[in-house]
């Protein structure tokens, strides 16, 4: 479902703005190699707290996915 860290250079993002401009961001192999050296190839995910203090079902699902991905890839999960 999610690409492995080594394949992350294939992931790209496009953000469309109201003035019709488009921001395109993608990883390069060089940038990915530097990142892999720093992280050791481990996935790190985090879950930020809800501003109003109450957890709802959508956040519980996001936390479940974040934790599961980190566990599956041998990484870490930060609960702030």
Image (tube, rainbow, N blue to C red):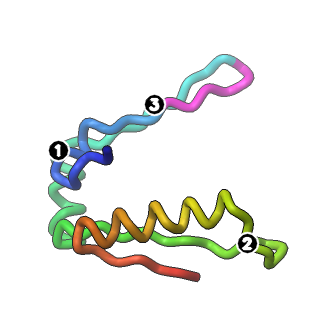
Q: What percent of the width, then of the height, locates residue 75?
A: 28, 74
Please give the label number shown on residue 55.
2
Quarter that holds the C terminus: bottom right
The reply to whether callout 3 and callout 1 are in contact (CB within 8 Å) is no
The reply to whether callout 3 and callout 2 are in contact (CB within 8 Å) is no
The part of the image, by quadrant, that contains residue 20 is top right
The single residue placed furthest to the front in the displayed view is 57
Q: Which residues are magenta?
A: 14-19
Q: Residue at x 61, y 66 (%)?
A: 60
The answer to whether residue 3 is above or below residue 77 is above
The part of the image, by quadrant, that contains residue 41 is bottom left
Query: Comparing marks 3 and 2, which lies closer to the viewer?
Result: 2
Q: Which residue is mark 3?
A: 24
Q: Earlier in the sequence, mark 3 or mark 2?
A: 3
Q: Badge 3 local density, few (<14 within 10 Å), some, or many (20+)? A: few
Q: What percent of the width, then of the height, locates residue 27?
A: 30, 43
15 relative to 1 in the view: left or right: right
Quarter that holds the N terminus: top left
Q: 60 or 80: nearer the eye?
A: 60
Q: Which residue is mark 1?
A: 29
């Amino acid at each position: 479902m999610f690409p492995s860290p080594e394949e992350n250079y294939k992931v790209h993002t496009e953000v469309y703005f109201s003035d019709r401009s488009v921001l395109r961001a993608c990883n390069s192999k060089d940038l990915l190699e530097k990142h892999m050296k720093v992280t050791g190839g481990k996935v790190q995910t985090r879950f930020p707290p809800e501003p109003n203090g109450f957890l709802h079902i959508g956040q519980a699902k996001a936390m479940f996915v974040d934790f599961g991905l980190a566990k599956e890839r041998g990484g870490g999960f930060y609960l702030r």
